[in-house]
Image (cartoon, rainbow, N blue to C red):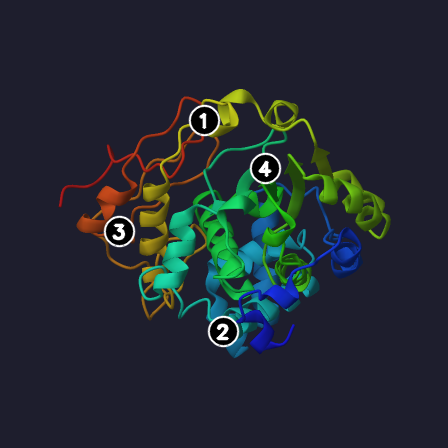
Amino acid sequence: MAQADVDRPMGKSDRPRTTGELMRSMRKLGDYDLDVEGDNDIEFGSLEERAVFEELVKKGSGHAIFDKAGPFWQMACLRARKYNVDRAYELIINYIKWRESFGIDTTTVDNDLEYRALVERGVVEACGNVDKQGRYVLTVRQSRTDPGRWSPRYAVLATHAALESVLMRFPKSQAQGVAFVNDMSGIKMANMDSRVPREMFAAFNSKLPVRFGGLYVVYPPLFMRMIAPVIRMFMSKKMQSRVKILSKGYKELQDHLDVDQLPEDFGGSYAYNHQDYLGYLSVMQGNYGTLRALDGKLLDANGERRASRYQSLAEEDDDEFHDCSDLDIDSLRSVSISCGSSGHGCWSVECDNLASV
């Protein structure tokens, strides 16, 4: 997609007027094969994984773009490409180039009011909940967006920020993949900007260090139910199996997410505070440009762990970490809610283990 088109909000002439127009504009989504080949037998966090990572570092060391990624994103790309070193190396280069060209590191919720407004609207939420296969979930509420106000660039920025926060807070998601819940309740054709999913799928296909775990489409409107079978015809069988059309809504979604993992407005009991999530993004994006170690902790210019007034937090039972090393006192209060009863708390940082200031 041309840059001017990515930055342009949807005008009246862009809106599909008929189901046929919408179907033709979205049919190419089937061209994207988001599955990757590789070795699924390598255990997360194992010595074997570390050995493959060292092989990747040996291959890329000295390449300016590869080195700019740092250990955290290098490992994330390796996991996203199922430990295929050559494909991981290619993904690292593509991802860092894309971050630069798309303005990821220069556009934040604190320096762009329109971007912040979109995130505050809650169009994309990374709650920290998981589906029944253990994959972390991003929830998209399309009825909250206004494509006449926000361009495809803002939509991709908000989605990337949510993905980045999940990959950083829950490293196992790098290997397990991320699932999407797309709540289409109340959607009209006027809310549909086919440029957004095309740009999103193109990024997933070759640029983002994340495995596409699946898509749950909740309350699809009639026009979407009509075109979905046509789009599916152009997808691989594996991709087809990962897309679930849930016409019965939140009740049917319970077949894929336990009730304690469903947000409260979906009829579940999973607590979520969007302001805490916004606070987390502010801190995360405030550290853009700083390299991170394998565990996500910040590194100084010499590649050493950056000094912190806080000691790292204890790992949870499932070996996922919650890192406070890059937070200051003022921002800490924005992310100090506690874990939910499921053990996969929202934007939770347990502060019992903080070192004294």
Q: Which residue is most to the left?
A: 357
> Is 234 in front, or is 34?
234
Q: CA distance from mark 3 to mark 2?
A: 24 Å
Can you say whether 153 is above or below 129 in the image? below
The tag earlier along the polypeptide, 3 or 1, is: 1
| Label 3 vs 4, first from the N-terminus | 4
Q: Are marks 3 and 2 in contact (CB under 8 Å)?
A: no
Query: Label 3, on which residue?
Result: 327
Q: Secondary structure at mark 1?
A: helix
Residue 356 image-quadrant placement = top left
Please tell me which of labels 2 and 4 falls first in the chain: 2
- Residue 270 in sight from this viewpoint: yes
SS category of the residue bearing label 2: helix
> What x and y, as percent, mark residue 21?
77, 58
Circle 1 Cα neighbour tier, 10 Å, few/some/many (<14 / 14–19 / ≥20) = few
Horizontal placement of 75 versus 23: left or right? left
Q: Which disc is residue 283 wearing? A: none
Q: Secondary structure at mark 4?
A: loop
Q: Please state which amino acid type lies under the numbered disc 2.
A: Glu
The residues tagged by marks 3 and 4 sit, at their Cα atoms, a distance apart of 37 Å
Badge 1 amino acid? Glu
In the image, what residue type sits under mark 4?
Ser
Quarter-wise, where is residue 169 in the image?
top left
- Going by the image, does 302 lie left or right of 90? left
Q: Residues within 10 Å of mark 4 (few under 14, many from 20)?
A: some
Residue at the disc numbered 4:
185
Judge left or right: residue 17 versus residue 282. right
Which one is in front in this view, the residue at disc 3 or the one at disc 1? Answer: 1
Mark 3 secondary-structure assignment: loop
Residue at mark 4 to residue at mark 1: CA–CA distance: 16 Å
